Amino acid sequence: MKRLWILLVFLSALSAETIHFETNYDAAMKKAKAEGKVLMAVITQTYCPWCDKFKNRTLVDPEVVKMVNENFVPLMLNKDVDDMPQDIRARMVPTTYFLDHTGEEVFSSIGYKHPRTFMGDMKDAIELGAEHGNIKAQ
């Protein structure tokens, strides 16, 4: 019985929806343009406990995952490892930039955010992205 329970937990974890982050800015921007979505760029650093908390609590929340996957092209960059695009200048981490189809910032969210708070930030980014003419009618 114990083995069956462990197997069920393992299989449910595998089937859980996740955010599939792009890791290349140019590819992510091209995809965002093609899909008519706002680019959501999450900027982190290697030894940042708040970045880890944001990634492990907020970005795995089922409602956040669903909203990201439906409305954004997600990109994750690490300031210590990745080449940072000219459009993005994160002074603090984590910072989430929401960029329109031209690479212009429409909204930003600085620091760790609770899932509900981050959902509000994403709603604002969607509204502002629509004002920039970035989102295709759904």
Image: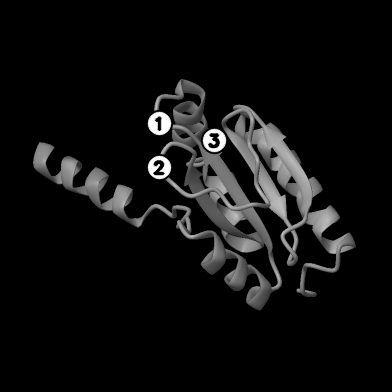
On the image, the x and y values in percent for residue 28 come to 55, 64
Q: Earlier in the sequence, mark 1 or mark 2?
A: 1
**What residue lies at 47% left-to-right and 41% top-to-bottom?**
60
Colour scheme of the rendered structure: one colour
Quarter occupied by residue 93? top right
Where residue 74 appears, as percent x and y from the top left, is 56, 56
Foreground mark, 1 or 3, reads 1
Label 2 neighbourhood size at 10 Å, few (<14), some (14-19), many (20+)? few
Residue 19 circle label: none
Q: Quadrant of the N terminus?
A: top left
Residue type of the residue flagged with mark 3: Thr
Residue 1 seen anywhere in this rendered image of the structure: no
Measuring 85% from the left and 68% from the top, which residue is drawn there? 133
Determine contact: label 1, label 3, CB under 8 Å. no
Of tags 1 and 2, the one toward the viewer is 2
- CA separation in Å, label 1 and label 2: 8 Å
Amino acid residing under circle 1: Thr
Residue 27 seen in render: yes
Residue behind mark 1: 46
Left or right: where 91 falls relative to 58: right
Identify the residue under disc 3. 58
Q: Secondary structure at mark 2?
A: loop
Percent of width and height locating residue 24: 48, 60
